[in-house]
Image: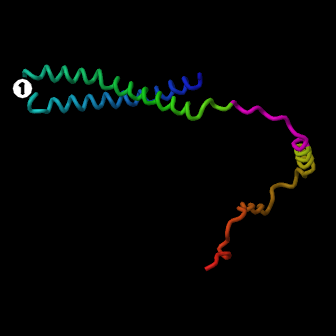
Amino acid sequence: MRPLVFRIVRNGVVTAFPLAMIGYLLAELAGFGLTTQPAFSQPRDAVAVEEISAQLRQRLPFTMAAWGVGLVTLWELLLFVVRGHPAPAPTPEEPTPHDDLYNQLLQHAETAAPASAGPRTTPAAPIAPTVPNTPRSTDAQP
């Protein structure tokens, strides 16, 4: 359960900050839109416009951030219910006799190679991957 909480906090914070910034920008745009309305252009309504703009700047960023964290929490809990607990990390396996033989052969090849041979003059051709059971263009029948 602990990894779930950490995942919710991490993803919630990453979601909340951009949504709060977007909410602030939307509040500023809404306040700007209110000041340009003809009904609020009279001097007596200027105080109401400032109050509404201030309330929007306070409420909208927090509301958007809270909705973002809530939705992230909901989706993370849903993923936890569907996926279950994460699988434990695999433990390193013991080396098999084949691995030991491979390492011995590799060491033998490295020590047997002459040091003054230098680089190859012709590069080795890459091995093309083969895909079994794939039809070739010559196998196609009309």
For residue 22, which quarter of the picture? top left
- For label 1, the crowd category at 10 Å Cα-Cα, with few meaning under 14, some 14 to 19 and many 20 or more, is few
Q: Main secondary structure of the magenta part?
A: loop
| Residue at the spot 93% in from the left edge and 50% down from the top edge | 112
- How far from the left and from the top, in percent, is residue 4? 56, 26
Residue sticking out furthest to the front:
81
For residue 132, which quarter of the picture? bottom right
Please count the marks in the image.
1
| Residue at the spot 7% in from the left edge and 21% down from the top edge | 44
Q: Report which residue position mark 1 lands on.
A: 42
Q: Nearer the viewer, residue 130 or 114?
A: 130
Q: Does 2 sit above or below residue 83?
A: above
Q: Secondary structure at mark 1?
A: loop
- How far from the left and from the top, in percent, is residue 75? 48, 32
Screen quadrant of the C terminus? bottom right
Q: Does 114 sit above or below residue 42?
A: below
- How far from the left and from the top, in percent, is residue 113? 90, 51
For residue 65, which quarter of the picture? top left
Side of 39 where 54 appears, left or right = right
Q: Nearer the viewer, residue 119 or 11?
A: 11
| Residue segment shown in magenta | 88-100
Residue 120 drawn in magenta: no
As shown in the figure, which amino acid type bears the numbered disc 1? Gln
- How far from the left and from the top, in percent, is residue 14? 46, 29
